[in-house]
Image (tube, grey):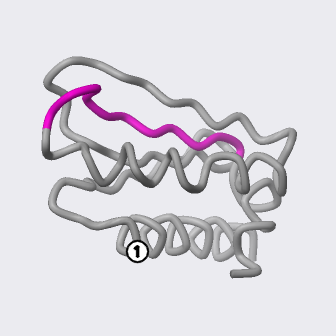
Amino acid sequence: MAWRGQLSKNLKELRILLCQSSPSSSSTRAFIENNYKDLKTLNPKLPILIRECSGVEPQLWARYDMGVERGVRLEGKDEAQISKALEELVKVGAALKA
């Protein structure tokens, strides 16, 4: 999982949108509880924004250089799939820099 340390090199900002109570956001909440500390420790200067809003669909958004953004819907995904989606967003950031 070396890609976790590459977040701040390939992203300008990471946003996680979720609902505080809906079942569709439960795996996103679990992902945050289990991974936020590690991600923040490896990328201390990267803004990781967690936005909670009642009834919102869980989503993951990455902002890259020049204001380019990419988003992924997380509804129906488990923690491993959310981690894979984040890894893919990091790879997109690396490709945009190349």
Q: Position of residue 66 (x, y in %)?
A: 67, 43
**Side (left or right) of 28 relative to 83:** left
Find residue 93 and report its image quarter.
bottom right
Q: Which residue lies furthest to the bottom in this view?
A: 1
Question: On screen, 86 above or below 54?
Answer: below
**Side (left or right) of 78 relative to 61:** left
Q: What stretch is highlighted in magenta?
A: 12-22
Tell me which residue sits at (64%, 76%) in the image. 95
- Looking at the picture, tell me which residue is in the foreground, 72 or 49: 49
The question of residue 9 being in magenta is answered with: no
The residue indicated by pointer 1 is: 80
**Side (left or right) of 67 relative to 84:** right
Q: Position of residue 59 (x, y in %)?
A: 32, 45
Find residue 98 and report its image quarter.
bottom right
The question of residue 18 being in magenta is answered with: yes
- Looking at the picture, tell me which residue is in the foreground, 10 or 76: 76
Q: What element carries label 1?
A: helix
Tell me which residue sits at (20%, 18%) in the image. 54
Tell me which residue sits at (25%, 46%) in the image. 26
Q: Residue furthest top?
A: 54
Q: Position of residue 46 (x, y in %)?
A: 77, 41
**Side (left or right) of 54 relative to 63:** left
Say which amino acid is labelled 1: Ala
- Looking at the picture, tell me which residue is in the foreground, 89 or 33: 33
Question: On screen, 70 above or below 63?
Answer: below
The local crowd at label 1, few if under 14, some if 14 to 19, many if 20 or more residues have their Cα within 10 Å, is few
Question: On screen, 98 above or below 73?
Answer: below
* Quadrant in which the N terminus appears: bottom right
Q: Where is residue 43 in the image (x, y as percent from the top left)?
A: 82, 51
Question: On screen, 72 above or below 56?
Answer: below
Q: How many labels does the image show?
A: 1
